[in-house]
Each structure stands twice: as structure tokens, then as C-alpha cells.
Image (cartoon, rainbow, N blue to C red):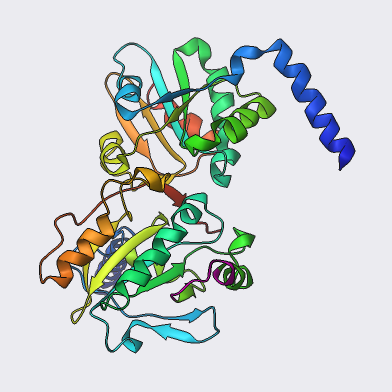
């Protein structure tokens, strides 16, 4: 009887634990993120801890094939150009499984990065293990993280007009990073934009 | 390849002449679309958010078309809200609708303030597509996921 009880208890704990992880939905504002080690398009592994001088990061889940990602590529490059020197480099991560979306393979990532002359690392989430921790659901999906505690400061869109850069009236990511650089918290911490669902099998 | 192109264009031309009304798509702002997302009558509305460039969206469209047809006499209405790029309305969306002979009502949502209307349509929607809203005057449910016909029909049945 005692054994049965402990088995049941164990099962209950195991179930709660399993569901707890599954339904968490990733990092929230204020959470501390775990570092990762992912392969960059230059075949070297990249971790956030490599960036000793950075004040934080603009982490962008993006990919080659999604038209919303493509429509935002120039804006992502502009963010890196503006903020890398101020201590907030862009780190791009492709979360898609190439088996589900062949155009998003590692080779294709290298090609796209070369074509567009990406100024930032473009990492491949091999095995699709990192994006669920963030709770990224689509591309593009931005997470701004501040050092030293690796705190999530902002989650969402680059600006308020993903489909047409000519119509942008509010630059969410720039405003958030500017606030952080001035020692303030971002006024808007969560925004949304249409994006392509992350492709997994 | 050439033959294929000819076949396609020939088919399109003949189709255009017999069915002109399908080739126009209305563009709505969120404020204009909103009334279609909160009608209060005896119908069930199935609203699918999609785009021609979104592979999983295109894959599930036949399920929505079939549902619209099967349940047309049971007060079910399907609305397809396209999130295609407004600039590609004539070049992509309309040719796609013609080619695939979609029967459901299709509108294009073009509104700059995505952060506002995504949250307004459903507080849980992160903005990824495909996404679907099913509602009637008593009940409302939002699905940020893909559907096949059986799954979709099962969900619809919970509203009938």
C-alpha cells in the first residue's frame, strides 16, 4: 500500500512537472534567460557569454523564407548597425526545422546572410531547443535582454508596421533599447505583430 | 514548362470571363473588419487569418472551404481574412483566389497598428498565422494553430 501510494505520488509529481514545463510558454518580462551555444553561419559556436563588452542583446528569431522576416531584414540590419556600437548587438536565430522548411537550412542561411550582408551572427537552432525556452512563436519575434542579470526587458515586434516600413510611426525596439541605455525600463514591454508560425515537424 | 504556362493562362482567361465577381477583394482596416468578428445572430462564424505566402495556411484552406460548403445550410459562415502584403493584392492574392477557385468570402486586412488589433482580436494571439476564430453570439474561441478537416469540424460542433 505504501509503495502504491509513493508510486502514485511520484506519478502525480511527474505529470505536474511535465505539464509545468510544457505549458509555461517561455520567458516572461523580468525573467532571467539561460545562455545558449548555437552554431553561427561562420561555423563557429556563439554564446551570449562571449560578448564581454555588451550591455545587453537584441535577440531576433527570424528565418530565410518567411515574407515577414524578409520584409524586416533591412530593419534588423539597421538595428545592429545602430546599437552594436552602443552595447546592444543583434543576435539572430533561425528556429525553423529545415525538414519542415527546406529553404531554412544551414546552407541557405549562409547564402542569405551573404546576399544581405548581415552584420550580426545568424545562428541555427539545431534541434529546435532554444526557441521553446524563449517561447518564440513566430518569425520575426524579438527579445531584448539586459546584462548583467540577463533580464528579459522586451518581447515582441520591431515596430508598428511589419508589412510596410514606410508606414512605421513607432519603433518599439529602438524605444526600448534607448530607454535601457538611459538607465530606464522600456515604456512598452510587450507588443505584437503578424509573423510566420515557427516550422517544426 | 511552356505548355504548363499556356495551360494556366488559358484556363485563367476563360475563367475570368465567366466569373468576374471573384476577382475583387475588399480591403478593410481593423475598425471596418471588427463588425464581422462580433456579429450577434443565430449564425456560427469561422474566421481564418491566413496569407498566400504562408505554407501551413494554404495547406489548411481546403478544410475551411469544405467546412463552409458542408455546413452552409446549418447557419455556418466562413470568412477568410488575408494578411497578404497590401502591395501584392493584384499580383498575388487575386491570382491565387482565381487559381484555387475559393468560394468563401475573402477580405484583406490592412491596418498599420498590428499591436493593437492583434490583441483586440484575441488577447492570447501572439500574431503567428495560421490562426482561427470561431464564434457565435454566446461563445468565442481563438486558435493559434493549424487545422485539418476533422479537427476543425470537431471544434465547430462544439458551437452548434
What residue is rendered at 32% in x and 29% in y? B30
What residue is rendered at 29% in x and 21% in y? B38
Report if residue B130 lies within the magenta region. Answer: no
Residue B115 position (above or below residue A100)? above
Tell me where residue A189 sits by quadrant: bottom left
Could you tell me how many numbered marks the image carries?
0
Location of residue B143 in the rendering, given as x and y in whole percent from the top left corner: 39, 40
Task: Find the magenta span and give its range.
Answer: A113-120
On the question of residue A197 being in view, the answer is no
- Locate the C terminus of chain A and report the quarter of the image it occupies: bottom right
Q: Is residue A30 left or right of residue A103?
A: left
Tell me where residue A140 sits by quadrant: bottom left
What residue is rendered at 42% in x and 28% in y? B47
Location of residue B147 in the rendering, given as x and y in whole percent from the top left corner: 51, 39
Tell me where residue A1 sits by quadrant: bottom left
Residue A53 position (above or below residue B89)? below
Q: Is residue A69 left or right of residue A50?
A: right
Nearer-the-camera pick, B122 or A105: A105
Nearer-the-camera pick, B159 or A62: A62
> Going by the picture, which residue comes out furthest to the right?
B3
Q: Is residue A53 left or right of residue A120?
A: left
Location of residue A40 in the rendering, given as x and y in whole percent from the top left corner: 50, 79
What residue is rendered at 64% in x and 61% in y? A102
On the question of residue B82 being in view, the answer is yes
Location of residue A193 in the rendering, given as x and y in whole percent from the top left corner: 35, 47
Amino acid at each position: 500500500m505504501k509503495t502504491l501510494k509513493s508510486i502514485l505520488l511520484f506519478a502525480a509529481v511527474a505529470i505536474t512537472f511535465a505539464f509545468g514545463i510544457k505549458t509555461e510558454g517561455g520567458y516572461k518580462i523580468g525573467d532571467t534567460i539561460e545562455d545558449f551555444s548555437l552554431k553561427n553561419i561562420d561555423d563557429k559556436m556563439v554564446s551570449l557569454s562571449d560578448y564581454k563588452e555588451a550591455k545587453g542583446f537584441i535577440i531576433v528569431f527570424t528565418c530565410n523564407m518567411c515574407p515577414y522576416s524578409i520584409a524586416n531584414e533591412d530593419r534588423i540590419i539597421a538595428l545592429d548597425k545602430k546599437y552594436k556600437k552602443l552595447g546592444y548587438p543583434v543576435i539572430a536565430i533561425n528556429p525553423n526545422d529545415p525538414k519542415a522548411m527546406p529553404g531554412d537550412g544551414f546552407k541557405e542561411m549562409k547564402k542569405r546572410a551573404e546576399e544581405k550582408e548581415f552584420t550580426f551572427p545568424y545562428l541555427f537552432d539545431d534541434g529546435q531547443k532554444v526557441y521553446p525556452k524563449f517561447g518564440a512563436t513566430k518569425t520575426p519575434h524579438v527579445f531584448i535582454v539586459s546584462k548583467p542579470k540577463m533580464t528579459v526587458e522586451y518581447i515582441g515586434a520591431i515596430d508598428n508596421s511589419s508589412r510596410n516600413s514606410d508606414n512605421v510611426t513607432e519603433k518599439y525596439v529602438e524605444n526600448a533599447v534607448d530607454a535601457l541605455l538611459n538607465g530606464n525600463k522600456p515604456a512598452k514591454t510587450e507588443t505584437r505583430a503578424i509573423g510566420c508560425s515557427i516550422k517544426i515537424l | 514548362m511552356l505548355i504548363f504556362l499556356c495551360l494556366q493562362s488559358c484556363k485563367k482567361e476563360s475563367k475570368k470571363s465567366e466569373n468576374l465577381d471573384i476577382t475583387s477583394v475588399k480591403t478593410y482596416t481593423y475598425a471596418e473588419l471588427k463588425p464581422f468578428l462580433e456579429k450577434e445572430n443565430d449564425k456560427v462564424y469561422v474566421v481564418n487569418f491566413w496569407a498566400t505566402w504562408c505554407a501551413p495556411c494554404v495547406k489548411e484552406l481546403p478544410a475551411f472551404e469544405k467546412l463552409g460548403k458542408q455546413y452552409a445550410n446549418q447557419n455556418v459562415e466562413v470568412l477568410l481574412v488575408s494578411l497578404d502584403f497590401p502591395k501584392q493584392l493584384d499580383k498575388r492574392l487575386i491570382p491565387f483566389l482565381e487559381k484555387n477557385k475559393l468560394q468563401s468570402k475573402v477580405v484583406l486586412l490592412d491596418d498599420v497598428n498590428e499591436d493593437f488589433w492583434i490583441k483586440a482580436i484575441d488577447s492570447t494571439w501572439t500574431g503567428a498565422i495560421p490562426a482561427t476564430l470561431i464564434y457565435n453570439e454566446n461563445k468565442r474561441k481563438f486558435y493559434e494553430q493549424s487545422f485539418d478537416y476533422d479537427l476543425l469540424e470537431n471544434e465547430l460542433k462544439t458551437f452548434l
